[in-house]
Image (tube, helix red, strand yellow):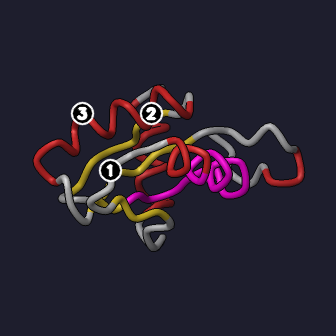
Amino acid sequence: METSQIKKLKALSHNLKPSINIGKEGVNEGVIQSIKEHLERFELIKIKFQKNKNSKVDLAKHIVSSTESSQISIIGNILIIFKVSSNMKYRQIKI
């Protein structure tokens, strides 16, 4: 992904609220499935790490690889990821 695309997605994500919270249970199959569903519907989402803050970089890598998405950034305890929706009616973001 190009720098200009990442900048655009960061700007678009600015007003988003976190749609997924990662708690003390960490990342399990149910959480991954929920993230996949949110990505399919919204394409660009924020994930907040409530706990596991020390391992957020590793968790972020796991989430990105499991969902086949692109990591846009980690700011504080918020991970921003993007994936183009496979459903044409949900495709809203042009990059």
Please state the extent of the stretch shown in magenta in the rendering: 34-47
Residue located at (30% from left, 39% from top): 59
Q: Amino acid at mark 3?
A: Asp
Task: Determine if the magenta segment contains residue 79.
Answer: no
Point out the frontmost of discs 3 and 1: 1
The residue to which callout 3 is attached is 58
Q: Residues within 10 Å of mark 3 (few under 14, many from 20)?
A: few
Q: Earlier in the sequence, mark 3 or mark 2?
A: 3
Q: Residue at x 22, y 38 (%)?
A: 57
Residue drawn where x is 55% and y is 49% of the image: 30
Judging by the rendered image, the residue that carries numbered circle 2 is 64
Element type where label 3 sits in the image: helix
Left or right of 68 in this view: 59: left
Query: Which quadrant holds the C terminus?
Result: top right
Label the magenta part by its dominant secondary structure: helix
Residue at position x 25%, y 66% in the image: 50
Quick check: is 46 in the magenta stretch? yes
Tell me residue 45's x, y (percent): 51, 56
Q: Quadrant of residue 4?
A: top left
Question: Cα distance, mark 3 to mark 1?
Answer: 11 Å
* Residue 15 shown left or right of residue 40 in the figure: left
Location of mark 1 (residue) = 26
Alpha carbon separation for disc pair 3 and 2: 10 Å
Residue 9 % position (x, y): 48, 49
